[in-house]
Image (spheres, rainbow, N blue to C red):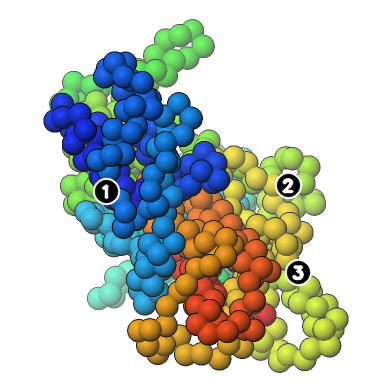
Amino acid sequence: MNATQEQLKLKLAQALVAAFGSDYTGVDPILVSASNPKFGDFQANVALSLSKKLGMQPRAIASAIVEKLDISDICDPPEIAGPGFINLKLQTSYLEAQLNAIKADPRLGVPTAKNPQKEIVDFSSPNIAKEMHVGHLRSTIIGDCIARILEFRGHDVLRLNHVGDWGTQFGMLITHLVDTYPDIGLMETSLGNYLHGDINIGDLVEFYREAKKKFDNDEEFRERSRQAVVNLQSEKEPFTTAAWTLICQASRKEFQEIYDRLDIELEERGESFYNRYLPKVVEDLEKAGLLEENQGAKCVFLDGFTNREGEPLPLIVQKSDGGYNYATTDLASLRYRIQEDQAKRIIYVTDAGQANHFAQFMQVAKKADWIPDDVELVHVPFGLVLGDDGKKFKTRSGDTVRLRDLLDEAVSRTRADLEARLTEEDREETEEFINNVADVVGISAVKYADLSQNRTSNYVFSYDKMLALKGNTAPYMLYAYVRNQGISREGNIDFENLGTDAKIILREDTELTLAKHLLQLDEVISEVEQDLLPNRLCDYLYNLSDKFNKFYENCPVLKSEEPIRTSRLMLCDLTARTLKLGLDLLGINVLERM
Ligand SMILES: NC(=[NH2+])NCCC[C@H](N)C(=O)O
């Protein structure tokens, strides 16, 4: 609901009380968008719902409300239609005034949140020594977009990378490291301990595979790996800790390359961070009387999760060997984020496959009374990335796709398209220009393809579709911006120094439609802030460029007489700035030329 709607709602509520008395204070006037734009912009349906209570015909109720309704500064005189709808149509002068007010505002009329709060977005979160896969890519893109929108609204956002940097697999990785580089030694320095020697892990995924193979086949290796885990978890054995650090750093370097290319800011606080808080989780669950032993494991039985026999399922928080798991870590991190970070909303962005995990540990935390009433926990699930064949996205040979290769491919295809276009248009551009355009458009296409889908559904990854110049794609949106800028440039006016008498004037229907859409940005952004669906913003921007095109087809801009010429140029400029701001919130940089 935007400011205009809020104002209308308020005035309707006041009219209702004026007409029928204070018993009707707080009654919702049921203001919604008009079911048919022919009838106006909004309709209030309250008269129909009050008919029984008042013992009156809805149309009579509607006219009694309208009689007391003073909205002459916002709308044309209201009309009563059908069984008793109150139809409202925004006045052109009102729309003009609104646009003239936002045109000098860098936030384009989007207010900051009334109650800014601490929000944590837990996203990306790949696992050390494993490949960062397309699922992590989705989490990274969606999480970043959500964080950008919350930041724009003025919230204090903590972007957390909950990397999988802890667990029994590190035993075998450390042992394999020692076996592969027998010459390594420990250096103890004032800045901490590290390993020295000729170490070059190279391909970490391959390294992981080798370690796993030995672990599965060699009892002696397995035993040493177990000892390494014990050493690591005690955090007291410097060599093991240094080896672990080295492995994490190698992975981190690879992740960072991806983050740099995608322009992602993230603070790493991995699972290991919570190691020291794990025993206390179990202790406090015990104190809360929630803990039960089940085949040697400590667990909490869950409501609403049952096995095939219909018996309640347990959430294990400590395994029979004393080890902790993914859920224990999430319980510890949850407490830390509430108590230390003082978060009021914690948003977890992962694939829908983890929905049970989130529902389960959140249920346990609620049972233990660890979640204050003013704290909200939200799992933001997303669907799978599929290949053309409708199966999980893979390379032709059936391997998981490396993100680096995926981004390279998007960029090189963009480059090929661009070069073909340059030849066709007989245009010459520098190598630098071509590189930059290919990079921006290629990366943006990958991001936009992901964000423009309703995240809850699976989506089919297709280079052809995401790179198409037509349709709801990044290249199309970036073009819309460039074209728009081109018109403004040709108009040759200085938007920043237009003077106060330069005003937006709305004459044609297509201008009015565009104007109304431009004024809906704040509503869309607060919707995304609530329901965390970035595709709403993509849809908004796509519709914006569609409405702009219709306006541009219908209304001459550069050839118009003043003051219409300047007014229309200002509409172009506002559209361009709205596109730029919207794309920026999606994590996409615009180009001035392409
Ligand atoms: N707090 C969380 N559990 N965050 C998500 C972690 C994602 C996990 N590392 C994975 O790759 O699936």
Compared with residue 314, is residue 270 higher up or lower down, i.e. above or below? below
Rendered residue at 55%/45% (across/down): 38
Compared with residue 498, is residue 191 higher up or lower down, i.e. above or below? above
Q: Amino acid at mark 1?
A: Asp
Give me the C-alpha separation between circle 1 and circle 3: 58 Å
Element class at badge 1: loop
Q: Along the polypeptide, which appears first: circle 1 or circle 3?
A: 1
Decide if residue 3 is in sight here. Answer: no
Q: Report x, y in % for residue 476.
A: 67, 66
Q: Return the mark for residue 387.
A: 2
Q: Quadrant of residue 404?
A: bottom right
Instruction: Kindly identify which residue carries mark 3.
Output: 413
Q: Along the polypeptide, which appears first: circle 2 or circle 3?
A: 2
Decide if residue 105 is in sight here. Answer: yes
| Left or right position of 170 against 330 | right
For the residue with label 1, is its CB less than 8 Å from the closest atom of ligand 1?
A: no
Circles 2 and 3: CB distance less than 8 Å? no
| Left or right position of 244 against 19 | right
